[in-house]
Image: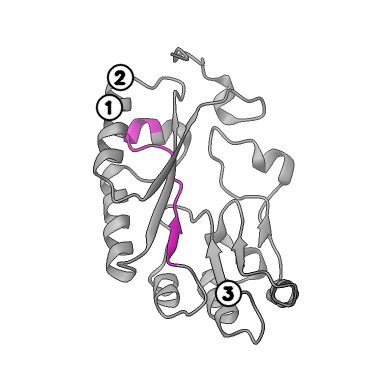
């Protein structure tokens, strides 16, 4: 639904080669959904580096709820629609209300949190901490009690200590997650973290 990203996460090179967030128009997306439906596609996945940023470059401050409502009311669209990659802290009440009152959208939240310790998150240039993430989960469960929740986490970010790693493992153990992906930090050029010493042993 968009290309590029306006976030500046220290581990991510996407903005350097894909540029700033550029949203596809609602008309363009609606036409593609209709075409997919005529081809017999059952489920459409809405993909963006930051889906909650859809529409900001088009002058819409919280565009994703409008997108959800438009797709749900479309004359022709796949029966199931799923959203990927919602940015922490940007899931608005309007979006949750739109998702709670839909017939097409799958009750599924993909919320990549990356870590839970505040110091690691600051070094990653990511928002929040374990406590704010717990509040996100509570907000999601109130609005969408049957929703499946998935997240992703990075281990071995430069400087990560045993204590910080333990904070993450404790958080994941108690979080209401149905699925989680765990990725080893990758030291990439053209990222903010590349200047940091990659000091966490692979093992």
Of mark 2 and mark 3, the one earlier in the sequence is 3
Q: Which residue is mark 3?
A: 67
Q: SS at mark 1? A: helix
Q: Which quarter of the rendering shows the N terminus?
A: bottom right
**Which portion, as a residue range, is magenta?**
107-120
Q: Is residue 24 left or right of residue 109?
A: right
Residue in view at x 44 percent, y 71 percent: 95
Coordinates of residue 109 in the picture (x, y in percent)? 43, 59
Looking at the image, which is closer to me, 16 or 152? Answer: 152
Q: Position of residue 84 (x, y in %)?
A: 54, 56
Q: How many residues crowd mark 3 within 10 Å: few (<14), some (14–19), many (20+)?
A: many
Q: Position of residue 117 (x, y in %)?
A: 32, 34
Callout 2–callout 3 Cβ contact below 8 Å: no
Between the residue at mark 2 and the residue at mark 3, the CA separation in whole angstroms equals 42 Å
Which residue is depicted at the point 47% across and 15% down?
Answer: 202
In the image shown, does 62 or 32 lie closer to the viewer?
32
Q: Residue 162 got which mark?
A: 2
Q: Is residue 97 above or below residue 181?
A: below
Residue 197: say if magenta.
no
- Total number of numbered discs in the rendering: 3
Q: Please give the residue where the numbered disc 1 appears in the rendered image.
A: 166
């Amino acid at each position: 639904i968009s290309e590029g990203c306006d976030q500046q996460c220290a581990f991510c090179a996407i903005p350097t080669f894909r540029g700033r967030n550029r949203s596809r128009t609602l008309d363009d997306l609606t036409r593609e959904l209709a075409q997919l439906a005529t081809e017999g596609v059952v489920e459409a996945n809405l993909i963006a580096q930051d889906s909650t940023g859809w529409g900001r470059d088009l002058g819409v401050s919280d565009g994703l709820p409008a997108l959800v409502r438009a797709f749900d009311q479309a004359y022709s669209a796949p029966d199931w629609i799923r959203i990927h990659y919602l940015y922490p802290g940007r899931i608005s009440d309007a979006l949750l209300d739109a998702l709670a009152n839909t017939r097409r959208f799958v009750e599924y939240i993909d919320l990549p949190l990356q870590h839970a310790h505040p110091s690691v998150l600051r070094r990653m240039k990511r928002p929040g901490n374990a406590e704010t993430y717990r509040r996100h989960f509570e907000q999601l469960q109130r609005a969408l009690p049957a929703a499946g929740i998935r997240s992703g986490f990075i281990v071995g970010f430069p400087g990560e200590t045993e204590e910080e790693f333990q904070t993450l493992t404790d958080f994941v153990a108690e979080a209401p997650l149905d699925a989680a992906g765990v990725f080893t930090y990758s030291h990439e050029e053209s990222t903010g973290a590349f200047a940091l010493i990659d000091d966490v042993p692979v093992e």
